[in-house]
Amino acid sequence: MATTTVTVKGQVTLPKEIRDAAGIKAGDRLKVEATASGGVYIEKPGSAAKYRKRLQALAKRRIMKVPATDAYMKQIRGDPDEDYSR
C-alpha cells in the first residue's frame, strides 16, 4: 500500500510501484470512479477484459482437475448407495 497527496489543482501522482504493478505508463488513459464506501477506484480501460480473457484461456487448459460435485461428495463422504448403517 502506498500513499500520495492531492495537489491544490486536484492532481495525484501514482507511486512508481503502483504504476509498475498495474502496467500504467505515461500517456495512458485511466478510468476513475468513486466507490460507495468513499474510496476511489482507478483502472486501465480494457484491463478487466484482458484479465477475463487470460482466465478463460487458463480454464480451457484445465490446469486444475476438479471432480464434479457428486464425485467429490462421494470421495469425502463415501458412496451413499453403499451405506449399510441404514
Image (cartoon, rainbow, N blue to C red):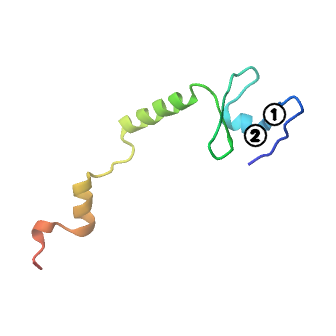
Marks 2 and 1, Cα distance to the nearest angstrom?
15 Å
Determine whether, in the image, residue 14 is placed left or right of residue 76: right
Q: Which residue is mark 1?
A: 12
- Quadrant including the C terminus: bottom left
Residue 5 at what x, y percent from top left? 85, 40
Q: Earlier in the sequence, mark 2 or mark 1?
A: 1
The residue type indicated by label 1 comes to Val
At horizontal 74% and vertical 20% (from top left) the residue drawn is 27
Q: Residue at x 26, y 54 (%)?
A: 69
Count of numbered circles in the view: 2
Hey, which quadrant is residue 29 in on the image? top right
Outermost residue toward the top in this view: 27
Mark 1: few/some/many CA within 10 Å (<14, 14-19, 20+): few
Residue 76 lies left or right of residue 29; in this view the side is left
Q: Nearer the viewer, residue 11 or 84?
A: 11
Q: Position of residue 22 (x, y in %)?
A: 67, 35
Frontmost residue, 51 versus 34: 34
Secondary structure of residue under mark 1: loop
Q: Position of residue 80 (x, y in %)?
A: 15, 67
Residue identifier under label 2: 17
Task: Classify 85 as above or below 71.
Answer: below
